[in-house]
Amino acid sequence: MKLLFDFLPILLFFIAYKLADIYVATGVLIVVTLAQVGWIWLRQRRVEKIPLFTAALVLVLGGATLLLHDPVFVKWKPTVVNWLFAAVFLGSRFIGQKTLLERMMGEQLELPGAVWVKLTFAWAVFFLVMGAANLYVAFTFSENAWVNFKLFGLLGLTLIFVLAQAAYMSRHLKTEDADPSKES
């Protein structure tokens, strides 16, 4: 359910673009993103940094797109988000004893420290590449192709990357040896 909630602004942006244009879609993106942050705050009485940061970027870059009637700003938003995520992931390697991934997932998964570092660097590189891919598509192809790529391409590539990460992690999970006295 959380995945659908997180995916909703992109989906509604896509639908609004197909039904109207980039400016209506940008307006929808702003409204839905701000509504999500409001919903989170109403339910939890707090909002984590990532949704707040994303909402701020949507508001600033989407607002610039609407005010200046120039879609270049909203086209930059996925790149800015991805590159900032890359910087955070890389920075987490050098701040504290655990990487961001280990802090986020360390309670659920027990992996060797070197694996957490490799995963963190892989995510950072992934975010850098995704940001560059967004710019390439946004400024090389048509606006319609970019909107399609934003929904299907970025999401599809992320899904493939997550599956590859899961396969890599599964090879390195620490497992407890089965207790022979508990076997029947």
Image: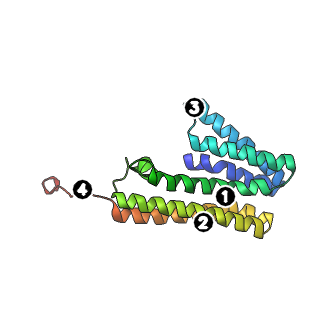
Q: Nearer the viewer, residue 167 or 179?
A: 167
Give the quarter of the image for residue 150. bottom right
Disc with the residue nearer the chain's start (1 vs 2):
1
- According to the picture, the residue beneath numbered tag 4 turns out to be 176
- Looking at the rendered structure, the kind of residue marked 1 is Thr
Question: What is the crowding at mark 4: few (fewer than 14 residues within 10 Å), some, or many (at least 20)?
Answer: few
Image quadrant in which you'd find residue 51: top right
Mark 4 vs mark 2, foreground winner is 2
Q: Earlier in the sequence, mark 4 or mark 1?
A: 1
**Which residue carries the number 3 mark?**
43
The residue wearing badge 1 is: 79
Q: Which amino acid does the dot numbered 3 rest on?
A: Arg
Q: Helix or strand or loop: what does disc 1 sit on?
A: helix
Asked whether residue 18 appears in the rendered view, the answer is yes
Residue wearing tag 2: 129
Dot 2: within a 10 Å radius of its alpha carbon, few (fewer than 14), some, or many (20 or more) residues? some
Front label number (3 vs 2): 2
Q: Residue at x 42, y 65 (%)?
A: 167
Q: Earlier in the sequence, mark 4 or mark 3?
A: 3
**Closer to the eye: label 3 or 1:** 1
x, y (%) of residue 60? 74, 45
* Separation of marks 3 and 2 at Cα, in angstroms: 35 Å
